[in-house]
Image (spheres, rainbow, N blue to C red):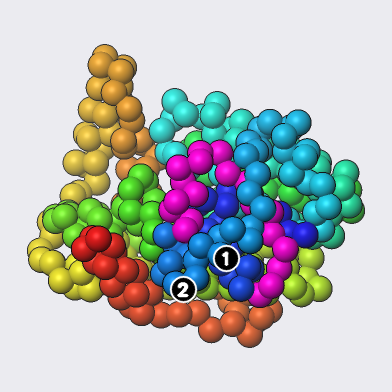
Amino acid sequence: MILVTGGTGLVGSHLLYNLITKGKNIRATYRRKHKLDTVKHVFSYYTDDYENLFNSIEWVDADITNIPNLTDAFKGITHVYHCAAFVSFEPDKYRTLRKINIEGTANIVNLSIKHNVKKLCYVSSIAAAGQTNNPDTLINETTEWNTELDHSVYAITKHGAELEVWRGTQENLNAVIVNPGIILGPGYWHGGGSGSLFKQIHNGLSFYTKGSSAYIDVWDTVDIMVQLMDSDIKNEGFILIAENIPFQDFNIKTAKALGVSKKTKEIKAWQLAFLWRLDWLSHKLLGKRRTLSKQLAKTLTSVTKHDNSKIKTTLNYNFTPIDVSIKKVSELYLKDLKH
């Protein structure tokens, strides 16, 4: 039996559909019951028979930081896809990020070892990849993580989670780690994920920054994860990105796909520097949630490029062009908007 943690998230829900249609026996964890309806909605993108497929999954209310109920979820499990995580760039959320992303992953690793799990796939992020000072140098799986750099709290905890997985491999656990870029996919239009970008652009997002990032769609992400788990590949990490794209280009492409205005104005680095300080002051004086940290402001103006050649060579994989992915996700967003 396969265990999927974070089954109600973007990657988890699309992964579940992929696995269940292959006839796999699936157990999936969730923390908030109302999010199960979102999984059904994701399934409905693929088929009218989504209720029966959803009901064929064994759902378990399990928090990855709660060892007793997580232990029950591991009974009879042979393979684990660890998708559960907490995503936040708010500095004051560091302890929560650490508890869920690092300690939670340590729990998954320890239980995988205890229950003789055959293989674990951990979903990390390019945020946990190394960094380079040269924007023209491609970041790959061998680029070193520099502890002296001012990383975001999210990146720090995802890197820490990877160390837990690598520790598990030293204790005879077979594992693969994937580091996706920004994952584009439908079903999750609210919150801080990529789905909210489509919503913001449709509602008239009128600014951009000079930075860039790497993108991949959820279908390629899930497909690669399944291929890696079904293969003999073990104890390897893979950067998963389809293309490196400037933020401005992504906004323009998405606006076009959504049929809205493409007029945008640049927010410069000095303006972001002022805004993150103002954000910090509002948090300190008024208790408002952080929306723009120093590290996030830097990311928004940084040009980074990632190398996908390792996974392309290993699996002979051809990524979906981002233009195609944007069009597909935009069509589903507009469809959901009508209902």
In the image shown, does 39 or 145 lie closer to the viewer? 39
Q: Mark 2 falls on what kind of element?
A: loop
| Residue with the most extreme top position | 285
Q: Quadrant of residue 280?
A: top left
> In the image, 268: left or right of 224?
left
At label 1, the amino acid type is Leu
The residue under label 2 is: 47
Q: Point out the image quarter for the C terminus.
A: bottom left
Disc 1 is placed on an element classified as helix
Q: Amino acid at mark 2?
A: Thr
Q: Residue at x 63, y 36 (%)?
A: 63
Q: Residues within 10 Å of mark 1 (few under 14, many from 20)?
A: some
The image shows residue 73 at horizontal and vertical percentages of 74, 44
Mark 1 — residue? 53
Q: Which residues are magenta?
A: 22-40
**Residue 282, position as x, y percentages in the image:** 25, 22
Residue toward you, 198 or 287:
198
x, y percent for residue 67: 74, 32
Is residue 224 visible in the rendered structure shown here? no
Queried whether the magenta region covers residue 298, the answer comes back as: no
